[in-house]
Image: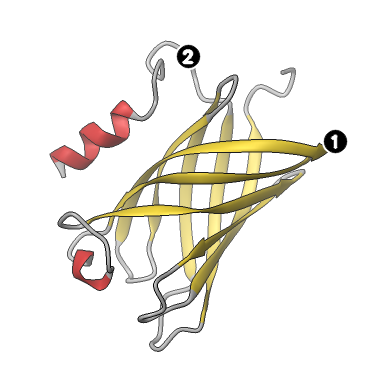
């Protein structure tokens, strides 16, 4: 767990200096092409620092294996219209005791990447998978600006 904490902390440059810009609340997920049952109520909380080019996020959530995971990610978003963005993200997540469930992992740390969108206070992320137990995952939730004047 110490290695994961160090990796996640390194992903947020300047986090100790400035507070986060956004709070996101993960609500759930939908597993497409699943060959087994997954937990699809996945409450979680994420903090995001919105920088000039990239966004940096860190958070914790109740994962699809019914345990708590932490995640750190870097994202790039493009504003399509007022209050509507699309983008990509990549990062790492810690799935305690479940690393062997993924085709790519270092112990229980797995890479995560996908496409994301936000419209006003609603977000969704699509994460492709290897197709062994699931083809892809759609996550969704609510997000709120912590500095609305920006």
Q: Residue at the bottom extreme?
A: 35
Residue 101: image quadrant is bottom left
Which-is-in-front pick, marks 1 and 2?
Answer: 1
What secondary structure is found at the residue carrying circle 1?
loop
Q: Residue at the top extreme?
A: 17
**Residue at the spot x=41%, y=78% of the render?**
131
Residue 133: image quadrant is bottom left
Residue hosting label 1: 82
What secondary structure is found at the residue carrying circle 2?
loop
Image position of 112 (left or right of 149) = left
Q: Measuring from the top left, give residue 38's x and y in whole percent.
A: 41, 78
**Residue at the spot x=31%, y=57% of the render?**
68
Task: Using the image, determine if residue 74 lies above or below residue 126.
Answer: above
**Residue at the spot x=34%, y=53% of the render?**
111
Label 1: few (<14), some or many (≥20) within 10 Å? few
Label 2: few (<14), some or many (≥20) within 10 Å? few
Name the N-terminal-most of marks 1 and 2. 2
Q: Measuring from the top left, give residue 91's x and y in whole percent.
A: 39, 44
Labelled disc at residue 105: none
Quadrant showing the C terminus: top right
Image position of 116 (left or right of 150) = left
Image position of 42 (left or right of 1) = right
**Residue at the spot x=43%, y=78% of the render?**
134
Labelled disc at residue 18: 2
Task: Using the image, determine if residue 143 lies above or below residue 21.
Answer: below
Who is closer to the viewer here, 115 or 58?
Answer: 115
Quadrant showing the N terminus: top left
């Amino acid at each position: 767990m110490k290695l994961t904490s160090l990796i996640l902390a390194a992903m947020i440059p300047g986090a100790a200096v400035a507070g986060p810009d956004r709070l996101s609340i993960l609500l759930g997920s939908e597993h497409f092409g699943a060959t087994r049952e997954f937990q699809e109520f996945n409450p979680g909380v994420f903090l995001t620092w919105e920088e000039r080019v990239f966004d940096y996020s860190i958070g914790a959530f109740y994962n699809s294996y019914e345990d708590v995971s932490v995640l750190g990610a870097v994202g790039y978003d493009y504003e399509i219209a007022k209050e509507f963005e699309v983008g990509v993200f990549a990062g790492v997540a810690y799935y305690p005791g479940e690393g062997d469930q993924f085709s790519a992992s270092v112990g229980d740390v797995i890479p995560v990447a996908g496409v994301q969108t936000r419209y006003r206070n609603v977000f969704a992320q699509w994460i492709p998978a290897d197709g062994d137990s699931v083809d892809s995952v759609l996550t969704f939730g609510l997000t709120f600006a912590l500095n609305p004047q920006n």
